Image: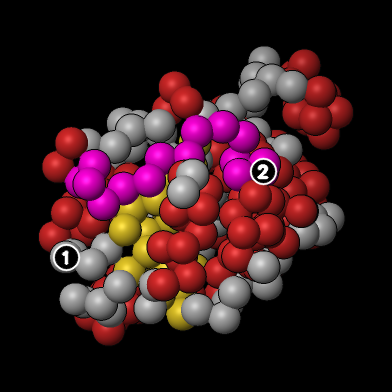
Amino acid sequence: MDKIQQAAQAIKDADALLIGASNGLSIAEGYHIFANNEMFRRQFGDIQQKYGIRSVIEGCFYPYPNEKDRQEFLNRLVQHWVTNYRPSQVMKDLLAVAGDKDYFILTSNADTHLELSGFAPGKVFEVEGTFEDMLHNRPMQDKGQEANAFLNRYHGKRLAILELGIGSRNHLIKLPLMQLAAREPQAVYITLNLAQELYIPNEIAHKSIGLAGDIAVTLQKLKEKLA
């Protein structure tokens, strides 16, 4: 049985799915907060020329001399990345992989693409808030209580942990997911990432599946195996 088949079987057998998502998932969709790419220059070229910002993440935290220019950047970001967003094939495939299973999602992607693609907002914890939170200066919504309720509900049961595009040294989401996999006896840890970012500690290697490569391609293959 190949790794894709193993992962599909683990998801099929699971009582629930805990999904962790970071930059790699957004990049697979074509949205890259760290890149000075064609999309960034097309959407923010005038602001880049004025202030020298080189990426969306720089634009979000740049010390603008006035609130008007900060609001202009954030307004445009929400317009291009949220309001104008249409669900990508990547998100459609992820929805298909989740199927009708109970799930909960932890993500540091502030773009709300998961919710906009059909995942239930009450089951998505944006752990660093959203672009809209930044625009409207509102506090992020803490869904720690919901996350804990989900984990308590599936404690000791067959939990598939599906990790999407989280860097190997990430402590915000990846570390807690690996720790959870270690202490949950029936958990399976499935991580999707580029080969150089794929990391599975020895302690959970026996219950882990690493799927290296383009997340978009891997999700499509998983969806086909689960169909």
User: Horizontally, is 114 left or right of 61 in the view?
Assistant: right
Q: Position of residue 84 (x, y in %)?
A: 83, 55
Residue at image position (17%, 54%) is 182
Q: Residue 119, how many percent across, how many down?
A: 61, 72
Disc sitting over residue 216 in the figure: 2
Question: In the structure shown, which secondary structural element does the residue marked by tag 2 occupy?
Answer: helix
Amino acid found under the numbered disc labelled 2: Ala
Q: Which mark is residue 185?
A: 1
> Whole-Å distance between the Cαs marked 1 and 2?
30 Å
Residue name at image x 52 percent, y 48 percent: 4
Residue at x-position 41% and y-position 72%: 13
Q: Name the spot of residue 134 as percent of width and height, x first.
A: 56, 52
Return the residue nearer the eye: 56 or 213: 213
Residue at left offset 26%, top offset 52%: 207
User: Which label was assigned to residue 213?
Assistant: none
Q: Can residue 15 be spotted in the picture?
A: yes
Q: Is residue 215 magenta?
A: yes
Q: Nearer the viewer, mark 1 or mark 2?
A: 1
Q: In the rendered image of this protein, does residue 38 appear above or below residue 94?
A: above
The local secondary structure at tag 1 comes to loop
How many residues crowd around disc 1 within 10 Å: few (fewer than 14), some, or many (20 or more)?
A: some
Residue at far front of view: 1
From the viewer's side, name the closer residue of 168 and 1. 1
Q: Amino acid at mark 1?
A: Pro
Residue 181: % across, % down? 23, 56
The residue stretch that appears in magenta: 204-218
N-terminal label among 1 and 2? 1
